[in-house]
Image (spheres, rainbow, N blue to C red):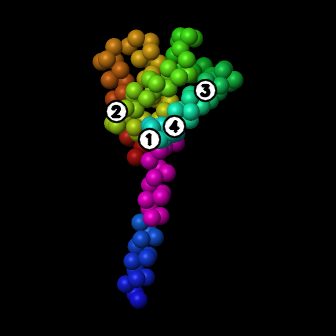
Amino acid sequence: MKTTLLKKTILLAVFCLSSAMGEDLVYSLGMLNGRGWVSAGHEGKLMYVRALNDVFVTFKCDESTDFWPDNDKITIGEIADVIDQFFADAANRSVPILGALSWAKQKMSGADAAALESLAATLRKGSASTK
């Protein structure tokens, strides 16, 4: 009888621990990260990028120039696709989506591969330092 209770207790502890860890995995620096991004469907990704755009426009965020592509002809879908490219590298998945957006801006502005890799490395390092 004691063995069954012990097994149930261990199982419950493992379940609770894995549930808690699962929630933390999709956040870095208090923001949704690449793990959350890749688990979202296409429509969810478009809504996320559109929401960022709406916030930048509505609140006239000066910081938006650090993240948002300069070209007004770039679509929300194109931005989401470039963020997908960033998170295709599993090493980048701990980076918050906002960081990936800054990488996307650089890529869409014509930054070379070395500059993009340097930015990605900086973003990875910044997101890892909080763990």
Pointer 2 or 1: first along the chain: 1
Pointer 1 or 4: first along the chain: 1
Q: Residue at 53%, 23% (x, y): give it.
A: 77
Question: Main structural element of the magenta stretch: helix, strand or loop?
Answer: helix
Q: Is residue 128 left or right of residue 55?
A: left
Tell me the kind of residue under disc 1: Arg
Mark 4–mark 2 distance (CA, rounded to whole Å): 18 Å
Count the labels in the image. 4
Mark 3–mark 4 distance (CA, rounded to whole Å): 14 Å
Closer to the camera in the image, 122 or 25: 25
Tell me the kind of residue under disc 2: Asp
Tell me the kind of residue under disc 4: Gly
Mark 1–mark 3 distance (CA, rounded to whole Å): 19 Å
Which residue matches tag 4? 41
Which residue matches tag 3? 50
Q: Residue at 47%, 58% (x, y): give it.
A: 19
Mark 2–mark 1 distance (CA, rounded to whole Å): 11 Å
Mark 1 touching mark 3, by CB under 8 A?
Answer: no
Which residue matches tag 1? 35
Q: Residue at 37%, 24% (x, y): give it.
A: 119
Helix, strand, or loop for circle 2? loop
Mark 1–mark 4 distance (CA, rounded to whole Å): 12 Å
Helix, strand, or loop for circle 3? helix
Helix, strand, or loop for circle 4? loop
Please give the label number shown on residue 89. Answer: 2
Pointer 3 or 4: first along the chain: 4
Please give the label number shown on residue 14. Answer: none
* Residue 1 part of the magenta-drawn span: no
Q: Which image quadrant is residue 103 in?
A: top left
Q: Which segment did they paint magenta?
A: 15-30
- Which residue lies most toward the right here? 58
